Image (cartoon, helix red, strand yellow):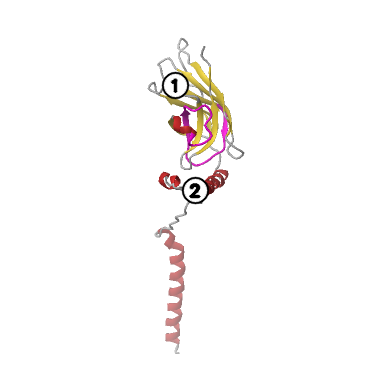
Amino acid sequence: MNKRALLIAVGLFVVLVGGGVAWWLISPLFLDTVVEEELPFEIPTEEEMADMSEEELAKVAADVMDAAAQMPDTEMDEEMPEMANDAQPVVVAQGQFKDADDFHKGAGTATLYRLPDGTHLLRFEDFTVTNGPQLHVLLANHADPANRNDLESGYVDLGGLKGNVGSQNYEIGADIAIDSVQSIVIYCKPFHVVFSTAPLSNSES
């Protein structure tokens, strides 16, 4: 190989190596890295759960327990809404949150207030509950529901739980029949699991 051919070969080698290094450094600016991780557990539909055996439902409950154990706490610290001096809220009912079982634990006070405009407010204080997926706050007609069957007597869903730790408020419209509410329930909607319940005692004479 003559000198000229050798120089050409070395030049091509440098170009190829240099180009490869340059592409390795620059390509992340132009190429997407796509990650599509699946949930560590499956959420069956209501129709699928209706057809499940007790053993399969127990497996689903175990999956949600494992998922909840890995979820970080979400803290809230809301204050009571301010009212005019001559228009104070009145306590209608109150109860203490308690554990649903050895895994799903809850504590704190749930208080129902009647506001001067006829609406109501649900207030959680010193509240904590085991975290989980899609926890909702329910106004239940059952005094102490332990499962989804107990909730068939009726409930009103106030929406998603704001945080599993800390004080928080939930507005209740004037069209909701508060007289039929006997407990406050923290409920996992995808798995139909009660996480905590606060049976209410009427505070009005």
Q: Amino acid at mark 2?
A: Ser
Can see residue 134?
yes
Pointer 2 or 1: first along the chain: 2
Q: Residue at x 59, y 37 (%)?
A: 101
Marks counted in the figure total 2
Considering every residue shown, the one lying at the far top of the view is 86
Q: CA distance from mark 2 to mark 1?
A: 36 Å
Taking the image as drawn, is residue 162 in sight? no
Residue at the spot of label 2 = 53
The answer to if 170 sits in the magenta stretch is no
- Between 158 and 99, which is closer to the camera in this rendering? 99
Bin the neighbour count of mark 1 within 10 Å (Cα to Cα): few under 14, some 14-19, many 20 and up: many
Residue at the bottom extreme, as displayed: 1
What residue does disc 1 label? 178
Q: Which residues are magenta?
A: 125-149
Q: Position of residue 173 (x, y in %)?
A: 40, 23
Specify the quadrant that holds the N terminus.
bottom left
Q: Which mark is residue 147?
A: none
Task: Reply yes or no: does residue 144 show up in magenta.
Answer: yes
Residue at screen point 44% across, 44% down = 50
Using the image as rendered, state which of residue 42 and residue 10 is in the foreground. Answer: 42
Mark 2 surroundings: few (<14), some (14-19) or many (≥20) residues within 10 A: few
Question: Percent from the top left, x then y, of residue 87?
Answer: 45, 12
Counting from the top left corner in percent of width and height, residue 72 is at 55, 42
Q: Nearer the viewer, residue 25 or 7?
A: 25
Place of residue 156 in the rendered image (x, y in percent of width and height, measured from the top left): 43, 29
